[in-house]
Image (cartoon, rainbow, N blue to C red):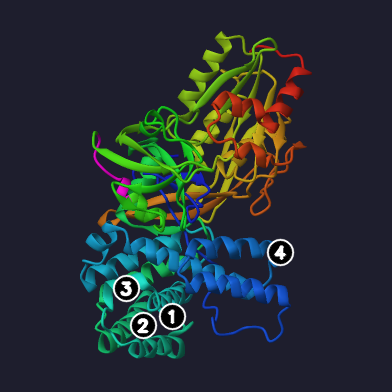
Amino acid sequence: MFSTTKMRLLKRFHSNHLWVYLLGCLLAAGSNHAGADPGELPIVIPVSQSQTIAKGEEFERNRQWIKAIEHYEEALKEWPENDNIKYGLRRAKIHFGIDRRYMDDSFSKVLLSQSRREAFILFDEILSKIQSHFVDPLSTTSFVAHGTESLYLALANDQFIKAHLKGVPPEKIRTVRRILRENYWNKSVSSHHGAHQLIIEVCTVSYQNLGLRDTAVISEYMFGGCNALDDYSSFLTPERLGDLYDNIEGEFVGIGIEMKAEIGEGMLLLNVLPDSPAEAAGVLSGDHIVGIDQNDCRNMTTDQAANLLRGNSGSQVVLELESPGSDRTRTARVIRKAVQVKSFPVVKMLDKENGIAYIKMTGFQKTSAAELDAALHKLHGEGMRSLIWDVRGNPGGLLSAAVEVLDRFLEEGKLVSTKGRVSDQNWSYTAHRPGTWKLPLVLLIDENSASASEIVAGALTDHRRATVVGRKSYGKWSVQSIFPIRGSTGLRLTTAKFYSPQGNTYGKIGIKPTITVEKDELQTAMYGASREQKLAADSDIKRGLQILQRQYAVTP
């Protein structure tokens, strides 16, 4: 559902690991634990946990926030109740968020340039919107406490210090951090006016001791306060909001790659979009970008590299690439242009003799339903009698798109329902008989199929409409709304939870497939293989083909 004030979407945001160039790399460094004390550790910790925590802290000392985040996330799978690991994860996420906004030009130009009055007006708008629309009630105390925590960590963050505290003696910074801990940690605040008073006191202390400008302090309360929300909610700078809209619209100017920073190695290319400038220039998934326009990027963050990749349509960027197993570099000259991101980048017949078709869906956006209609009619003309629908790795997208594509495969009954604190978040969506395709269906899911992808899996499972093959899905069963606010900024807020036709919700649980197939690690190592070779070697697709080859396929 889309309106001029907000847009509802369902998407797993996991950009602490991944940058989809100009598709919207968004991190919600959130937590539901207010004001945890970083100085408190249990007296007795098993050796293995102690070593794990020490390794995470080593990553933090080296400012390797992504590695720290990944490390703590893996550790929580083994020790989910360990508060030290939980706080280490939140600490690393907060530092990562601080780094990102201080490398975001729109943050400096728009937010740091505000007056104190303008900053407080924006602070009030953010807090009011959260308290009226966020899926769970949130106290002013919790919001402000998380802001205090964010400022406390910012005062030990290299990017923040570089921007505001050059030449300030470390002992003065430690003094302000101690004051925050002793006087303002979890301090009760009952109103917006009380929040203003507390923040003004902190601004005064910060300016008197450090010469720190008010807007730098208030910004930490705006962004840090949102850490009290869930992992899918955050305050967006103008640049991040624009990236998100580009993602939803499915079009951007760039080179068409998905990449992940690997410190010391460069940018690992996880995906090269079909028909993109990068593909045309011979860039391959599995390559590492080690240089961008003669700038060595082996030790850059994804944001730093992405900033170098930005440019106007028609401009050229020169990439230095290394292939797996080779120390030699090669050069690719890539011309930036408008890239149309397809919801269905792969549409083909896999088994013409048995009429088995295949579609790969990578996102749920405005164009998805029209793309699906075109794909199905194309495949029908080529003899399609059954279909494998692949939503593996699909993080989600628009709720409306999920409903529209599902409606192509279900004749009647409920598709999905949503429930939130506000009445306009309570909806139920049902199928329509006209235009339904009745052919046998296999749905492929994996651990990265999230949100809108899980709506599809949940509905097809409850209606027994498809055989679901693969691995348990991610487990994000919430709806986010996008609220544009002043200064071209925005709020992405979780405003509802969604439920399958039978009333089930699988948040943090995920949907189990009908048939589980173990993940094939060899398949991801097929560097340079053609799309046809990768499809032929895909163990999930092989299982889907086996299922459909046993069935009698019927055309719609």
Q: CA distance from mark 4 to mark 1?
A: 37 Å
Residue name at image x 43 percent, y 62 percent:
130
- Mark 1 highlights which residue? 189
- Residue that label 3 marks: 218
Residue type beneath disc 3: Ile
Q: At 70% from the left edge and 41% from the top edge, which residue is drawn?
A: 502
Q: Percent position (x, y) of residue 280?
A: 38, 28
Any part of residue 321 in sight? yes
The circle on residue 260 is: none
**Can you give x and y, in whole percent of width and height, for residue 27 in the image?**
45, 57
Q: Earlier in the sequence, mark 2 or mark 4?
A: 4
In the picture, the quarter occupied by the N terminus is: top left
Magenta-drawn stretch contains 312: yes
Above or below: residue 501 compared with residue 156: above
Lateral position of residue 436 relative to residue 148, left or right: right
Query: Few, some or many C-alpha atoms within 10 Å of disc 4 (few <14, some 14-19, many ≥20)?
Result: few
Q: Amino acid at mark 2?
A: Leu
Q: Vertically, is 280 above or below 192?
A: above
- Marks 3,1: beta carbons within 8 A: no
Q: Earlier in the sequence, mark 2 or mark 1?
A: 1
Q: CA distance from mark 2 to mark 1?
A: 8 Å
Task: Give the Cα separation between the discs numbered 4 and 3.
Answer: 37 Å
In-front residue for pair 76/240: 76
Q: Earlier in the sequence, mark 3 or mark 1?
A: 1
Give the structural element (helix, strand or loop) at label 3: helix
Pointer 2 residue: 198
Amino acid on which disc 1 is placed: Val
Determine the secondary structure under disc 2.
helix
Residues shaded magenta: 307-313
- In the rendered image, which residue does mark 4 sit on? 78
